[in-house]
Every structure is written in structure tokens, then in C-alpha cells.
Image: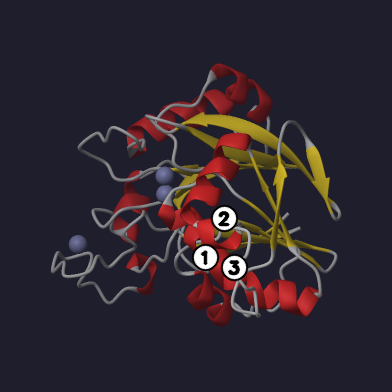
Amino acid sequence: MKVVFIGTGTSTGVPVIGCKCRICSSNKPKNKRLRQSLWISEKNFSLLIDATIDLRQQALLYSIDKVDAIAITHPHADHILGLDETRIYSYLNKKPLPIYATKSTIDGIKRSLWYCFEEGIPKGGGLPEIELIEIKKEFSVGPLNLIPLKGDHGFQEVTGFRIGKLCYLTDCKKVPEETILKAKGCEILIINALREKPEHPTHMTVSESINVIRQINPQKAYLVHLGHQVDYDELKGKLPSDIEPAFDGLVLEL
Ligand SMILES: [Zn+2]
Ligand SMILES: [Zn+2]
Ligand SMILES: [Zn+2]
């Protein structure tokens, strides 16, 4: 299984529009972050986790020429607005693109992309052809098996996934005990950390993430959904050797 970090940034992306801070002004490629997403492929099967606002840019940059399915973590704009870009994939696949999400996320997608689901709106190639499939428990897509993991995003639920040796948790403020138990013993943990401080009502800071990482105890953890307060090299230098900030373009082979 190949995992490509096609975006590691928080909802604004980094640089932030109009911001002149030293991270946003930095020339270092590892300080440039598109919106948070993973591209997972196995045996010619191609899965995206989330469809970000930057999906078109990510698809062109990483040559994501084929997508067979998408699993969505939650219906915030930075994670779902790229669904509108998926019409090219359903056109190439000659069938609607399967989108896996929990009931509350499906409701959110239907509210945001209402024009895809209303009766009587002509499709005419301009609308994404997506098939919303509700996640209730463990499920398979192509050769991949996904175990949903509950996360607490402050005011709403977010869904993470365990896929074999990999666990993925984004946009968590807290990680429930049942998820810690399901994630325990994974090889790689990808988990959100907005910045070192101050604390945030809906996203974990680096120290809050480390606290969860120590409970799950993976061989290696990568921090994602990073804000413009994070300089890649400085944060990497402060972290223990089994935890690293992720960066756009990082590839893992599992
Ligand atoms: Zn987000
Ligand atoms: Zn900035
Ligand atoms: Zn969110």
C-alpha cells in the first residue's frame, strides 16, 4: 500500500491569504501546505481520504489520474468541497464515484452540495456523479479494508480510519477511549496537530497529540493538519525521533 500526503495544512492552507508571517513568507517547500488529504493506492486501486478545496491542484501535482472511491472524515468545507471536482473521475470510470461517509457527514454533504441531489437539475456533464454510501462499521473498498475510528472535533464527530497497519485521525480535539483501543499497536499513526500553542477549541495542539500518540503507541507517528505557526524544521527538531511533522509530497510504502 502506498500513501501520499497530498495536503498537510489546516483549513486555511499555508501560506494563509494576506499573511506576512515568517512561515507564510518562507521559501521552504516543507512550509507550504495544501488542505489535509491522503491518497492511498493498492494494486491499481486508488482511494482518497477527503476531497479538499485544493483537489484539482493536488490531482494535477501528484498525477492522480484515477480515483475509485473516496472516504470522507467530516463535512467541513476544507474536506468536502473538492467533491465538485470529482466529475472527471466518474466520467472516466463511466459510473458514479462511491463516497463513503457516516450518516451525519452524508447529511452535511447533501446540504453543501445541494445542487447535486435536487430533482430536476440538468446534469449535462457539469455536475459530479457521486454515490453516497453510509458507513456503519468496518467495510471494504477494492483491496482495502477500512475500520472507522470515532474522533471528537470539539462540536461534532469526525471519522478516522484504520487501514491495515495505518491509522489516520484528522481534525480531532479529543480521541475517545474506544478509538485508542482500536488504534493500539498500529505501525503508522497519522494524527492532527494544529500548532504548539495556544490551545484551540476544535483541534489538538502538538502536546495534546503527543499525549494521544503515547496512548496508541505506534512505531511511528506523523503530525498533519498543520497551521501557519509551524516551521517544519523547528518542530521536527523538538520532537522525539518516533514523531515527525508530515509535509506535502511525503510518501510512505506499507
Ligand atoms: Zn480540517
Ligand atoms: Zn502566516
Ligand atoms: Zn474540521
Task: Answer whether residue 250 is visible to the viewer in this image.
Answer: no
Which quadrant is the C terminus positioned in? bottom right
- Badge 3 is on which residue? 121
How far across and down, in percent of the image, does residue 7 sit?
Answer: 48, 63
* 32 relative to 101 in the view: left or right: left
How far across and down, in percent of the image, does residue 168 sit?
Answer: 59, 43
* Distance Cα–Cα, label 1 vs label 2: 8 Å
Q: Which amino acid type corresponds to the residue marked 1 in the rendered image? A: Gly
- Badge 1 is on which residue? 82
Residue at point 47%, 66% (across, down): 248
Q: Which amino acid type corresponds to the residue marked 2 in the rendered image? A: Asp
Label whose residue precedes the other's in the sequence (1 or 3): 1
* 236 relative to 100 in the view: left or right: left
Residue at point 68%, 30% (across, down): 185
Give above or below for 120 relative to 112. Answer: below
Comparing 225 with 79, the one in front is 79
Q: Residue furthest front?
A: 120
| CB within 8 Å, label 1 to label 2 | yes
Mark 1 crowdedness (10 Å alpha carbons): few <14, some 14-19, many ≥20: some
Quadrant of the rendered structure where residue 44 is?
bottom right
| CB within 8 Å, label 3 to label 2 | no
How far across and down, in percent of the image, does residue 2 sit?
Answer: 71, 62
Look at the numbered disc 1 and give the secondary structure of its residue.
Answer: helix
- Badge 2 is on which residue? 50
